[in-house]
Image (cartoon, helix red, strand yellow):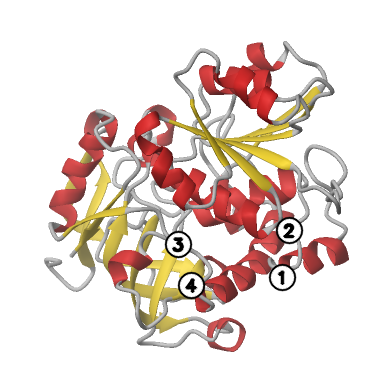
Amino acid sequence: MANDHDKQSALVGGPNYSIILSHAAPLPPNTLEDGMLAIAVAAVSLNPVDTKMTGGYHTVGAIAGCEYAGIVTTVGAGVSERWDVKVGDRVGAAIMGMNPRQPSIGAFAQHSVAPGHCVLKLPDEWSLARGAGIGNAWYTVPWALFYALGLPPGPKLQPLGDWIDSFGLKPQLGAKVMLNADKAQSVLVSGGSSSTGTCAIQLLKMAGFNVVATCSARNMTLVKSFGADATYDYTDRNCAGDIREHTGNSLRFAIDCISTPETTQLCYEAIGRTGGRYVSLDPFSQTVASTRKVVSAGWVLGPELVGEEIAWPAPHGREANPIAREFCIAWNITLQKLLDQDHIRTHPQLVRNTGLEGVLGGLEEIRAKQVSAQKLTFTY
């Protein structure tokens, strides 16, 4: 428990780019801005990005973590009216941890805050641990698919599609692509067994696409269970060629959920003869990208959807993006609808009731690449 009324237990940036457990971490601000809500945290999930907060991304004393679930304790102006969230509701939230602009706000703590457009009310049958599994993936991936790649969301993902049309949103990689009414187009999901990969598979199927996914051989059954139409082992030297054969050398779209030079190369080799579009969830190899001028490439940053300045070093640092924020507002309404109608499935979770102390060990497991096809989740 926190030591006094203005402190709490939390995982914060320590010396030498470490993450340490502090029992004297600051509480979030007492006065909530309009559209914000305060939450007593009960469960958190881990992501690879949580282990990458080193160098200029590391802020001593700032609270880490970006995915959590808990009980609403206070709501700011407009939250109940716009998002139908009130004190006592069970919610999941996605935020930006290790934030130098707001060091007292992070997921790995006893108390946190979040903007209403990044919060979801949990169904009654969902545990808080399960709610912590709907995090950044379910915001970053739609931004990549329906903005960067310019794919049409389709009628199942409303009101996002209507908002895109009414807003006149210009995709990062060119004009929107119309679906072939006679034959669904294929999209490659590189890293299909990651949490972003299983999210991408589900959203692409809802949008009416065929999904070709790469993963390890041991995870193929899992990936197919999320809806992938075809799976390929990324370690097979013929992987890209097999995908080209499967798609008739006409694959036009790829989302890279792993974002290494090797996965970029695989995607570029799999994209068909006439070229297409490639989007990554992190900066990608420009050397690989230069090999095919007929492929348009870009990458997205999930925290941009909050709509605030990101004070991280280049290339991740950027000014507040009001378009990303408006996209997120429209998407959050869509996502809440999908959640309420039981249309989404969270990534497989490994849940441990070991609190913040357990999170420290979980971060080491992720650094050591000991976690595959599971999302580590910790309850307090």
State left or right for residue 178 relative to residue 110: right
Q: Which is more foreground, mark 4 or mark 3?
A: 3
The residue where tag 4 is placed is: 120
Q: Position of residue 104 (x, y in %)?
A: 35, 57
Check disc 2 and report its element: helix, strand or loop: loop
Check disc 1 and report its element: helix, strand or loop: loop
Residue at 35% x, 62% y: name it.
132
First along the sequence among labels 1 and 2:
2
Label 1–label 2 contact, CB within 8 A: yes
State left or right for residue 242 relative to residue 97: right
State left or right for residue 214 relative to residue 38: right
The disc placed on residue 345 is: 3
Amino acid type indicated by mark 3: Arg
The residue where tag 2 is placed is: 153
Amino acid type indicated by mark 1: Gln
Q: Which is more foreground, mark 3 or mark 1?
A: 3
Residue 165: image quadrant is bottom right
Amino acid type indicated by mark 2: Pro
Q: Which quadrant is home to the N terminus?
A: bottom left
Q: Position of residue 321 (x, y in %)?
A: 69, 51
Q: Residues within 10 Å of mark 1 (few under 14, many from 20)?
A: some
Q: CA distance from mark 1 to mark 4?
A: 16 Å
The residue where tag 1 is placed is: 158
Q: CA distance from mark 2 to mark 4?
A: 20 Å
